[in-house]
Amino acid sequence: MIEINKKEVIRYLGYRGIGEPDEHLNKLIDECIKELQDKATPRSVYKTFPINWNSDMENVTENGCEFAGITVSSGNLLKNLKGCSEIVMLAVTIGPAPDMLVRRSEVRDIMKAYTYQAAGAAMVEAWCDEINNKIIEDAQAKGLYARPRFSPGYGDFPLEVQMDFERILDMPKSIGVTLSESLLMTPTKSVTAVIGLSDKDMDCHKGGCEECSMHESCEYSR
C-alpha cells in the first residue's frame, strides 16, 4: 500500500496559508485516500544508460550530451546532469482507478472529484519517491549518487521526449501507459523522469531542488 501524505493532498487542493479544511472536507479527504489505496495498481519501469558527453565537461550547456539515442540540448537538464556518467529513465503509474473515480464523481459531486484528483496527484508522487529511493540504493551499491529527478516538460526539457520514453521503456506493455496525440499520458496519474548518476556526492535534497537551501547557488540545480 502506498502511504499518502495528507498534507500534500491538502496542498494540491489549494490550501496554502488560507486556513485549514473543515471537518467535512477532512473526512472526504480520508475517504478518497482510503479508496485510492484500495484500488490503485502501482507499476514502474526504469532502465539505466551511459551518458555520452559531446565535448568539454566545463561547457556542458553549450555542447550537450546523448543517451539511449536521445540528444539532449536542454540547458536546464544539462546543468542538472553535469558530472554524471549514467542516467536512469523512469516511468511510473498508479493505474486507471484515479481517472475512473474522478469521472464518476464529476457527474454528482464535483468536490469529491477535485479531492480524488488531489489525492491521486499526491499518491503518484509518493509512488515515484518510493521508486526513486530504490534507484538511489541501486546507485549507491555501485558507488554512484543520484541527482534530483527531472521530467519532460520541466524547464526547457521538451515534452516531445515522452515519445522516446514510451518507445525505450515500452510503456504500453510494461506498465500500461500510453500517450495521446498531445503527448499526455493515460492513465493521467503517471510520471516520467530522468535521474542522473554521478560519482560526486552532492547530498541532494530528497524533496528536490526547490526544497533545498542551496537551490539558488548550486551549480547542478534544476
Image: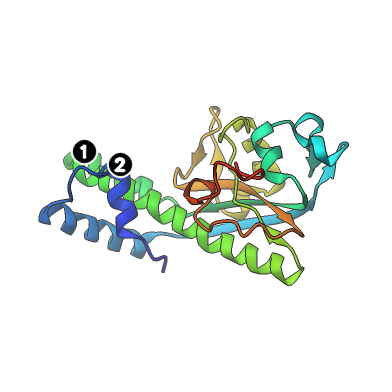
Q: Which residue appears farthest toward the front when viewing the image?
A: 217
| Residue in the picture at 18% in, 50% down | 20
The mark total stands at 2
Picture coordinates of residue 61, whole percent (x, y): 75, 33
Give the secondary structure at mark 1: helix
Report the side of 48 relative to 24 (left or right): right
Crowdedness near tag 1: few (<14), some (14–19) or many (≥20) residues, C-alpha within 10 Å = few
Picture coordinates of residue 91, whole percent (x, y): 59, 51
| Residue in the picture at 51% in, 51% down | 212
Q: Which residue is mark 1?
A: 107
Give the secondary structure at mark 2: helix
Picture coordinates of residue 186, whole percent (x, y): 49, 42
- Pick whichever, 95 or 200, lies toward us: 200
Image position of 75 with respect to 1: above or below:
above
Kindly tell me whether residue 71 is visible in this rendering. Answer: no
Q: CA distance from mark 1 to mark 2?
A: 7 Å
Q: Which residue appears farthest toward the bottom when viewing the image?
A: 141
Amino acid under label 2?
Arg
Q: Which residue is mark 2?
A: 103
Picture coordinates of residue 57, whole percent (x, y): 83, 41
| Residue in the picture at 56% in, 32% down | 183
